[in-house]
């Protein structure tokens, strides 16, 4: 395929994962782990690629704000209204910007764009960033002095994105937190609490929690353990990734999101469950599923409720096929070829024999894994330019 554009690719990790700023990435890159390396493979093929750390336990709004600052440069601004509403600090880290001319016109009068690729919770992270770029935030505009308002909240920037790609995205939420509701809060308390316990230690520099804005974690200084901020976040909704991953939370957070005619959209997803034996009304993991995922998969394999029937039971170990295929309220078509792709429509690919961590390289052959991302780059860069 002919390369029509060559915009930078930003690969965004999901829940509990990390980017290239973390020490752990030197040993186990999220997009490659021990089998391949998507960033290196794409760079070798001639693409500009970045893999930022946007918070393993941060909510989609906060991740989008970090992602904006990471790409464009500047200090992270979570918003005056948002920070006051959820009880976090308004400002975060400062970044030099990996694409500082993002959104600006080049010498040919064309806008500098980027391609966003999100895995798992990286899917709604990308969609949140696109929503804010396009629509801004009326709440932030009303609450903030214009001189202090972040450009992210002003809107009018949908044409800064060329393509949006979701890999096993949690678009409409997953039923895992719904099915395991009694253990969600204890699990959240442990995850958030560890951030405080390891603050200021070598562990925090190897794997950063990115909950500094809540006073829960820090890579540089020790924070005396205080369960109050931890439990406050555990029982919160907006900003609490465990709630935002649920079907209720995802629907609430993304209910106003939509597609835009200046952006191409693609999804990829896998499934490694099959019909349960003996006529049982559920699914079971296949022998190909990575063993650590199987206990989590079983929660979804037999779970149903009034809004999520048996069609939601097939999953990739963590994410339901039904939610990964595409955002349920958006226009979508089955992908056939690049030549047939239009903007503003999610093009979903056939279900692959992959589990959730296959897109991270686990259990994949390095050459196959690397080729997937190189082919993805080729496909995206063959798409016609948009205004």
Image (tube, grey):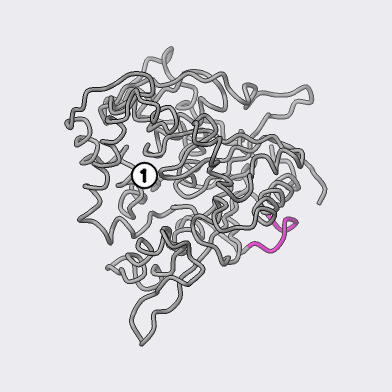
Tell me if mark 1 has few (under 14), some (14-19) or many (20+) residues whose alpha carbon lies within 10 angstroms of its own: many
Front one among 35 and 146: 35
Secondary structure under the numbered disc 1 in the rendered image: helix
Q: Is residue 78 magenta?
A: no
Furthest residue in direction bottom, as rendered: 278
Q: Is residue 186 in view from this perspective?
A: yes
Residue 86, quarter of the rendered image: top left
Image check: 49 left or right of 260?
A: right
Q: Which residues are magenta?
A: 335-341
Residue at x 43% of width, y 79% of height? 275
* Quarter residue 63 falls in: top left
Q: Quadrant of the C terminus?
A: top right
Q: Would you name the residue on which mark 1 appears?
A: 253
- Compared to residue 353, the image places residue 264 above or below, namely above
Given residues 243 and 155, the one toward you in this image is 243
The image position of residue 363, as x and y in percent, is 56, 58
Q: Position of residue 23 (x, y in %)?
A: 50, 31
Residue drawn at (29%, 26%) of the image: 88
Q: Left of 172 or right of it: where is 130?
A: right
């Amino acid at each position: 395929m002919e390369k029509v554009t060559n915009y930078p690719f930003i690969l965004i990790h999901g829940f509990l994962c990390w980017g290239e700023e973390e020490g752990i990435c030197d040993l186990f890159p999220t997009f490659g782990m021990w089998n391949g390396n998507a960033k290196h493979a794409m760079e070798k093929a001639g693409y500009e690629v970045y893999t930022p750390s946007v918070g393993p336990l941060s909510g989609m709004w906060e991740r989008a704000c970090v992602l904006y600052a990471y790409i464009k440069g500047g200090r992270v601004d979570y918003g005056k209204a948002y920070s006051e509403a959820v009880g976090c600090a308004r400002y975060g880290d400062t970044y030099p910007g990996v694409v500082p001319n993002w959104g600006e016109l080049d010498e040919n009068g064309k806008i500098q764009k980027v391609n966003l690729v999100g895995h798992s919770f990286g899917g709604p992270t990308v969609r949140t960033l696109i929503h804010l770029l396009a629509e801004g935030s009326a709440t932030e505009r009303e609450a903030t002095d214009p001189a202090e308002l972040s450009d992210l909240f002003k809107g009018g920037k949908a044409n800064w994105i060329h393509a949006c790609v979701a890999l096993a995205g949690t678009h409409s939420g997953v039923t895992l937190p719904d099915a395991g509701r009694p253990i969600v809060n204890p699990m959240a308390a442990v995850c958030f609490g560890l951030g405080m316990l390891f603050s200021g230690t070598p562990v925090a520099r190897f794997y950063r929690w990115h909950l500094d804005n809540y006073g829960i974690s820090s890579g540089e200084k020790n924070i005396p353990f205080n369960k109050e901020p931890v439990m406050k976040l555990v029982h919160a909704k907006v900003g609490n990734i465990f709630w935002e991953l649920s079907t209720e939370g995802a629907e609430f957070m993304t209910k106003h999101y939509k597609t835009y005619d200046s952006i191409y959209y693609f999804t990829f997803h896998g499934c490694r469950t099959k019909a349960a034996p003996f006529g049982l009304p559920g699914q079971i993991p296949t022998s190909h599923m990575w063993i650590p995922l199987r206990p989590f998969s079983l929660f979804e394999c037999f779970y149903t409720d009034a809004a999520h029937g048996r069609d939601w039971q097939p999953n990739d170990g963590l994410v339901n096929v039904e939610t990964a295929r595409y955002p349920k309220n958006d226009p979508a078509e089955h992908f056939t070829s690049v030549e047939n792709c239009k903007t503003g429509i999610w093009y979903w690919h056939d279900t692959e024999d992959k589990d959730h961590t296959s897109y991270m390289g686990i259990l994949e052959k390095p050459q196959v894994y690397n080729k997937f991302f190189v082919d993805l780059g080729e496909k995206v860069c063959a798409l016609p330019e948009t205004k």
